[in-house]
Amino acid sequence: MSTWRELTFPDNSLKDAVLVIEDDRANVLADPLRWRILEILGDGKSVAEISQMLDVTDARVLYHLQRLAQTGVVHLEEEGADPQEWRCLPAAGAIRVRETRATGEQIAEAMPTDVVSQFNQASREAAEGLYGSTFQMSVNHNRARLSEDQAAEFGRRLLALIEEYFPPGKGDRSGIKYGFYGIITPIDLHPLGDSATEE
């Protein structure tokens, strides 16, 4: 099955040119953050402008712009010593991308769709009182800049807790069945030219 996605850049000097992508470059453009960069690009923006608009570090933006430039859909003007000021321009007035996926094939996700659905359904049921008033529920989203050693230690301690409280076949069969799905992953890069900031 294939579908077409299209973006136009009407203020671009190449507004009459259409770039059609039907090969492996479509996989690079399937990344949601890269597509979002293209959506806000307009007639061109600097690395710093894109970083500010998307609320991600300039280093991360630069990485994705370089990948986009490899596909030929944008031009990255690397003028000057400061990469934050480098400008990214669309390579055409319109981009058409054919995305082809086999039936049932899904884009790899850190948290599978069926798991997300199960947790969202349970959350709605808990809000309606299905589990009574004494159940435990915790939803956390935390971000911090960690060293590799700190991240490794967190992972080890978390796994120890999971092994203690979620041992296969050793829970309390009379209790409520709880689910836990944990992900620790890098979510952004350190900003360009910044040696000691922390969020």
Image: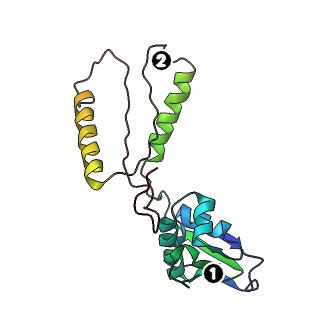
Residue 114 in view, yes or no = yes
- Where on the picture, by quarter, is residue 3? bottom right
| Side of 157 where 180 appears, left or right | right
**5 is within the stretch colored magenta:** no
Q: Which mark is residue 36?
A: none
By what rule are the colours in the image chosen? rainbow
**Is 177 in the magenta?**
yes
Amino acid type of disc 1? Val
Q: Is residue 3 visible?
A: no
The secondary element bearing badge 1 is classed as: strand
Residue 8 percent coordinates (x, y): 72, 74
Q: Quadrant of the N terminus?
A: bottom right
- Residue 116: x %, y % from top left: 48, 41
For marks 2 and 1, give the CA distance: 53 Å
Give the amino acid type for the residue marked by disc 2 in the picture.
Tyr
Q: Residue 124 versus residue 3: which sits nearer the camera?
A: 124
SS for dot 2: loop
26 vs 6, left or right, is: left
Residue at 38% of width from left, 39% of height from top? 181
| Image position, residue 65 (x, y; %) | 53, 74
Identify the residue at image location x=63%, y=61%.
Answer: 53
Depicted 50 relative to depicted 76: above or below: above
* Magenta span: 174-185
How many numbered marks, from 0 up?
Answer: 2
The one nearer the camera, 109 or 54, is: 54
Q: Which residue is mark 2?
A: 131
Badge 1 is on which residue? 20
Crowding at label 2, few (<14), some or many (≥20) Cα neighbours within 10 Å? few
